[in-house]
């Protein structure tokens, strides 16, 4: 997510024009409600298709720096991409209980909200908010 920038595009307009599947659209609006409540930040568009919550500035030892949302997701055609994970001990412990998901280095993929445990999602988001506040970098960064 580090190469993504805030765009100012309207989130509802994006969802209504980009997401064709009505169930995915409903899940997107529910995710917005959940992530807004947990993070305390309103949803904003980052790049052409990422809905982000909050932001932070990062600067790595290499000199690379930028801004990124603290939490985020994208309602892609194949699956939702969730940008909500940081490598804390607690996150590693509970991630296997999240539900029916696929995991990569930078994000978690899910087909629909009904496939996951919302309480676990909330705890992962809270862990990420704490991690970023302490480290000023996303947990997906590798040396």
Image (spheres, grey):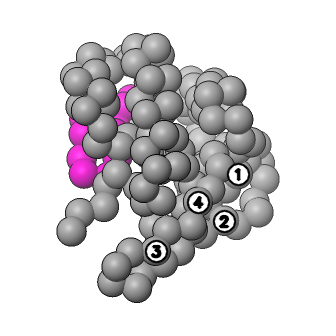
> Tag 4, which secondary structure?
strand
Mark 1 neighbour density, 10 Å: few (under 14) some (14–19) many (20 or more): many
Dots 1, 3 in contact, CB < 8 A: no
> Which residue ends up furthest to the bottom in the rendered image?
63
Dots 2, 4 in contact, CB < 8 A: no
Tell me the distance, in whole angstroms, between the alpha carbons under discs 1 and 2: 7 Å
User: Quadrant location of the C terminus?
Assistant: bottom left
> Tag 1, which secondary structure?
strand
The residue shown at (43%, 34%) is 127
Residue 119 x, y percent position in the rendering: 46, 14
Residue 104 colored in magenta in the image: yes
Q: From the viewer's perspective, is the residue at label 2 or at label 4 nearer? A: 4
Q: From the viewer's perspective, is the residue at label 1 or at label 3 nearer? A: 3
For residue 46, which quarter of the picture?
bottom right
Can residue 86 be seen here? The reply is yes
Q: Give the magenta-colored segment's residue range.
A: 100-113
Dots 1, 2 in contact, CB < 8 A: yes
| Sequence-first tag of 1 and 3 | 1
| Sequence-first tag of 2 and 4 | 2
The residue shown at (37%, 41%) is 85
17 lies above or below 32: below
Residue designated by label 3: 59
Tell me the distance, in whole angstroms, between the alpha carbons under discs 1 and 3: 22 Å
- Image disc number at residue 6: 2
| Sequence-first tag of 1 and 4 | 1
The residue shown at (23%, 24%) is 93
For residue 38, which quarter of the picture?
top right
């Amino acid at each position: 997510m580090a190469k993504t920038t805030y765009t100012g595009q309207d989130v509802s307009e994006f969802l209504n024009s980009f997401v064709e599947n009505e169930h995915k659209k409903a899940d997107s609006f529910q995710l917005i409600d959940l992530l807004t409540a947990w993070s305390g930040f309103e949803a904003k568009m980052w790049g052409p298709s990422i809905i982000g919550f909050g932001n932070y500035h990062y600067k790595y030892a290499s000199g690379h720096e930028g801004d990124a949302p603290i939490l985020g997701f994208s309602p892609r055609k194949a699956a939702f991409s969730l940008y909500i994970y940081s490598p804390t001990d607690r996150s590693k412990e509970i991630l296997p209980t999240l539900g029916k998901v696929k995991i990569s280095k930078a994000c978690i993929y899910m087909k629909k909200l009904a496939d996951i445990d919302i309480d676990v999602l909330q705890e992962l988001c809270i862990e990420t908010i704490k991690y970023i506040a302490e480290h000023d970098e996303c947990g997906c960064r590798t040396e």
